[in-house]
Image (cartoon, rainbow, N blue to C red):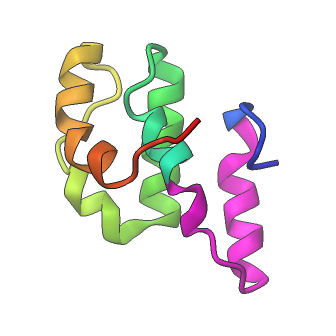
Amino acid sequence: MLQSDDWRFHKAAIKEMRRRGEDVTVYLPRIVALLAADSKVERSAGQMTIKDCFPELAAEIQGYSPTADVEACRTKAAPLLSRFPLRS
């Protein structure tokens, strides 16, 4: 599910994989990339997934608002985007 571009399942899949003891950090680039998506809904999904599944990273985007202008979102998410680049 996490290999798919369908972000709607990412949070549940990460929670399940973490419950099974699997390393979910390999999926961080995909989740972090959502913070810079053109869609406000996708940005919201990325923020919620980080908040619920990676709380240690949530503090790094404190003040991030997925409803803000996309450029403001990208600026706020830039530190995480550079730490977890999405590779093709």
Position of the C terminus, as image quadrant, is top right
Residue most toward the front?
Answer: 88
- For image coordinates 64% across by 77% down, the residue present is 23
- For image coordinates 75% across by 44% down, the residue present is 9
- For image coordinates 59% across by 56% down, the residue present is 27
Residue most toward the bottom?
Answer: 21
User: Viewed as shown, does residue 69 lie left or right of 24?
Assistant: left
- Say which of 32 and 48 sits in front: 32
User: Viewed as shown, does residue 33 lie left or right of 73?
Assistant: right
Q: How many marks?
A: 0
User: Viewed as shown, does residue 62 lie left or right of 30?
Assistant: left
- Say which of 81 and 66 sits in front: 81
Query: Where's residue 84, x and y in %?
Result: 39, 52
Q: Is residue 38 magenta?
A: no
Query: Where's residue 59, x and y in %?
Result: 23, 62
The relative height of residue 40 versus residue 13 in the rendered view (above or below) is: above
Q: In this picture, which residue range is highlighted in magenta?
A: 8-28
Query: Where's residue 57, x and y in %?
Result: 32, 63
The relative height of residue 28 versus residue 8 in the rendered view (above or below) is: below
Query: Where's residue 8, x and y in %?
Result: 71, 36
From the image, give the main secondary structure of the stretch colored magenta. Answer: helix
The relative height of residue 34 versus residue 47 in the rendered view (above or below) is: above
Q: Quarter-wise, where is residue 51 in the image?
A: bottom left
- Say which of 57 and 3 sits in front: 3
- For image coordinates 52% across by 22% down, the residue present is 41
The relative height of residue 33 versus residue 79 in the rendered view (above or below) is: above
